[in-house]
Image (tube, rainbow, N blue to C red):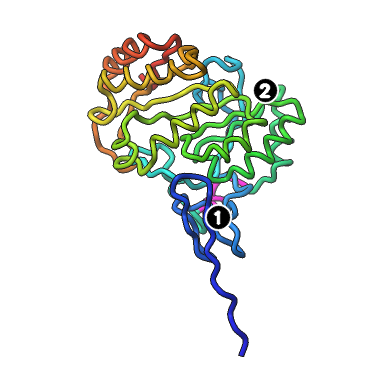
Amino acid sequence: MEQKPESRTAVCEVCFRRCRIPEGGTGACLARGNRGGKVVPLNYGMAVALALDPIEKKPLRRFFPGSRILSVGSFGCNLRCPFCQNDEISTAGLPDAESMTRKSMAREISPGELVRLAASLRDEGNLGIAFTYNEPLVGWEYVRETAERSHAEGMKNVLVTNGTASVTILRELLPVIDAMNIDLKGFTESFYRDYLGGDLAMTKRFIEEAAGRCHVELTTLLIPGKNDTEEEIRAETAWIASLNGGRGAEIPLHLSRYFPRYRETIPATDPAEVYHLADIARENLRYVYPGNC
């Protein structure tokens, strides 16, 4: 009688979760799975969002302002923010993503095809490629291969990320990433752990490593009663200012107005509070940008 091969569990090394994934299963991000005893990106080459955006929409204010960038996103995310603005793709896995691809303008696109598309848009002001919308690091292999090809064509690469990934993964990408916007979603362990399902320490290590190695801008979405006290903003911005050997005051910070989305029903942030906290942040940082007001 033929024996079935033993089920092999594989450990994903991308983030703090270190998901132990059984054969045929997926990790918490819904985008990485165990296939043949190896963790692979299930979202490789599946573009469920594709648009030519202003660079300021990433948001990046001090990286080639006035340019545009071809923005691509897939499915999956390793956080569970209750206010997610892109929950249709961040919380999707297979086969939901396959269904989205069939029903929308999304497409399966190889690294080479994406780079050729980006190059064809140069006359429209395109600077390169931004990996965004969902969490691109849950499919970092596609990011790396595409970014390598993009650099070879003389284009820029942008990563828009929650920073919930190991320094090992970050170092795989740093040689081919020109700019990042990293979400620093709050500045307390309890906020990250209990509200987002994340790990503040991992995100801080990610930011520390990225700062100074490429152009970095940070974003904090201000949620009333969650992460919006003067004390927290002062602590956050003092830490940012300490980066790069004490030269972190040059790192731009975007303080964005929150609106109810997905599962969160807290009323929208008062614009006056956003501007007030931006003034607090300027005590430590040179470039502070209120957003969504």
Q: Give the amino acid type for the residue marked by disc 1 in the picture.
A: Glu
Element assignment for label 2:
helix
Q: Position of residue 102 (x, y in %)?
A: 57, 53
- Left/right of residue 142 with respect to residue 84 in the rendered view: right
Question: Where is mark 1, residue-wise?
Answer: 98
- Residue at x 53% of width, y 35% of height: 132
Question: Where is mark 2, residue-wise?
Answer: 124
- Residue at x 50% of width, y 13% of height: 247
Task: Name the magenta segment's main secondary structure.
Answer: helix
Task: Between residue 150 and residue 232, name the one nearer to us.
Answer: 232
Is residue 213 shown above or below 31?
Answer: above
- Residue at x 40% of width, y 37% of height: 85
Q: Position of residue 114 (x, y in %)?
A: 69, 39
Q: Position of residue 90 (x, y in %)?
A: 45, 45
Where residue 249 sits, quadrant-wise, is top left
The residue mark sitting in front, 2 or 1, is: 1
The disc, 2 or 1, on the residue closer to the chain's N-terminal end is 1
Is residue 138 shown above or below 171?
Answer: below
Residue count near mark 2 (Cα–Cα under 10 Å), binned few <14, some 14–19, many ≥20: few
Q: Quadrant of the C terminus?
A: top left
106 within the magenta span:
yes
Q: Give the amino acid type for the residue marked by disc 2 in the picture.
A: Glu
Q: Which residues are magenta?
A: 97-107
